[in-house]
């Protein structure tokens, strides 16, 4: 089923002086999506989120929400829930008063406010904390209060600006699970900002990867991970190996190219010029060691130079001589290779993804 666009950014450009924080950004968001804006620091994630919220006015382009142009509508009239990086709770007010505040501003009745505050406290699992002040809560609890406050008036869209970045890893994991459950329960459209690719892949129904103010790729986490469009996407998402092939030629086995002295096959996904260069991305977990098991595999000869066990995975560094270095990742349950072993690194040709030569 094709989902109608709920929120769309069309050709959004925002400049600070001569620098474009956003450069012709197009993003499509469907109702009920959990979208993550992902990218390195300075790539334009917060600017994009703040343009959706209405705090940043773009010089060019259009933002439409549910069929209406909202490009110039002020933030308070958009009615979106926003959770900022700092939790921005009122320190002198109790948890209940913090959450009730947006409803009081809207002039709702005491009874309605009490009922809504309880409901949202239940959603973020903070019932019983009503009378505490923010200073009496942990960072994770404060963050849940900020989320509750943004959700209490049932906004059609919840915008989250790196809400979990200040928390330690374990707590972040718990709150990520909480956010995912909240999204599933409410069905509200979420737009989240993060620089953490695991968070993006784990939580989202859609990932928008930004680089230098442009959209490098957008799609489901599976699409972005399995079919990166460029060398930058392959590297940023999953830290894939990117090999440069040259002397591309079409043979009876399809397109092949040279990585040093190794001849490797490539299934073209983009135009390829005979005699020219091409790039392939191979995910770390798609590479095996030892004799290639089948005709549809390619391999390079080399040496295992480092082996590192990190809990459930073993990371291997393989020196493919003139073909370059490869990083491998395998479950710790398989036989662990030893450093210094001369062997082959192999992968299925179907796992070598042809990517465009864009490194940023
Ligand atoms: P991200 O959220 O991905 O880290 P930002 O959206 O905050 O990136 O910033 C994108 C770019 O725009 C950066 O180069 C940043 O320095 C610049 N920028 C953001 N906000 C401002 C501002 N208010 N004034 C000047 N430059 C800004």
Image (spheres, grey):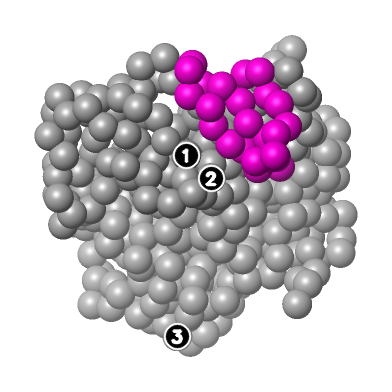
Marking on residue 115: 3
Horizontal side of residue 304 vs 339, given as left or right: right
Secondary element at image label 2: helix
Q: Are marks 1 and 2 in contact (CB under 8 Å)?
A: yes
2 or 3: mark nearer the eye: 2
Horizontal side of residue 211 vs 16, given as left or right: left
In this view of the protein, which residue sits in the foreground, 255 or 326? 255
Taking the magenta stretch, the answer to whether it contains residue 252 is: yes
Secondary element at image label 3: helix
CA distance for labels 2 and 3: 59 Å
- Which residue is tagged 2? 349
In this view of the protein, which residue sits in the foreground, 119 or 285? 285
- Which residue is tagged 1? 298
Q: Residue at x 43, y 51 (%)?
A: 294
Q: Is residue 162 visible?
A: no
Query: In the picture shown, does residue 144 fall above or below 244?
Result: below
């Amino acid at each position: 089923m094709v989902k109608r666009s709920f929120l769309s950014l069309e050709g959004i450009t925002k400049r600070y002086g001569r620098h474009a924080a956003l450069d012709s950004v197009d993003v499509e968001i469907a109702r009920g999506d959990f979208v993550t804006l992902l990218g390195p620091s300075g790539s334009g994630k917060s600017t994009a989120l703040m343009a959706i919220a209405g705090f940043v006015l773009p010089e060019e382009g259009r933002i439409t929400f549910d069929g209406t142009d909202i490009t110039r509508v002020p933030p308070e009239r958009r009615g979106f829930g926003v959770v900022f990086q700092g939790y921005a709770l009122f320190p002198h007010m109790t948890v209940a008063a913090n959450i009730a505040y947006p409803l009081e501003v809207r002039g709702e009745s005491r009874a309605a406010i009490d009922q809504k505050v309880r409901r949202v406290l239940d959603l973020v699992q903070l019932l019983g904390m009503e009378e505490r002040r923010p200073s009496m809560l942990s960072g994770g609890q404060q963050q849940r209060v900020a989320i509750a406050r943004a959700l209490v008036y049932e906004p059609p869209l919840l915008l989250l600006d790196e809400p979990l970045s200040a928390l330690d890893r374990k707590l972040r994991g718990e709150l990520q699970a909480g956010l995912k459950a909240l999204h599933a329960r409410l069905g509200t459209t979420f737009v989240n900002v993060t620089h953490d690719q695991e968070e993006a892949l784990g939580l989202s129904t859609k990932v928008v990867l930004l680089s230098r103010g442009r959209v490098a790729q957008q799609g489901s986490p599976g699409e972005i991970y399995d079919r990166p469009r460029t060398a930058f996407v392959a590297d940023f998402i999953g830290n894939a190996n990117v090999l440069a092939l040259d002397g591309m030629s079409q043979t009876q086995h399809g397109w092949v190219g040279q990585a040093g002295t190794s001849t490797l096959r490539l299934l073209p996904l983009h135009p390829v010029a005979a005699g020219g260069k091409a790039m392939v991305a191979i995910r770390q977990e798609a590479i095996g060691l030892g004799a290639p098991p089948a005709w549809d595999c390619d391999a390079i000869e080399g040496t295992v130079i480092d082996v590192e066990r990190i809990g459930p995975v073993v990371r291997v560094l393989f020196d493919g001589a003139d073909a370059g270095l490869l990083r491998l990742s395998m479950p710790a349950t398989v036989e662990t290779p030893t450093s210094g072993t001369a062997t082959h690194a192999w992968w299925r040709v179907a796992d070598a993804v042809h990517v465009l030569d864009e490194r940023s």
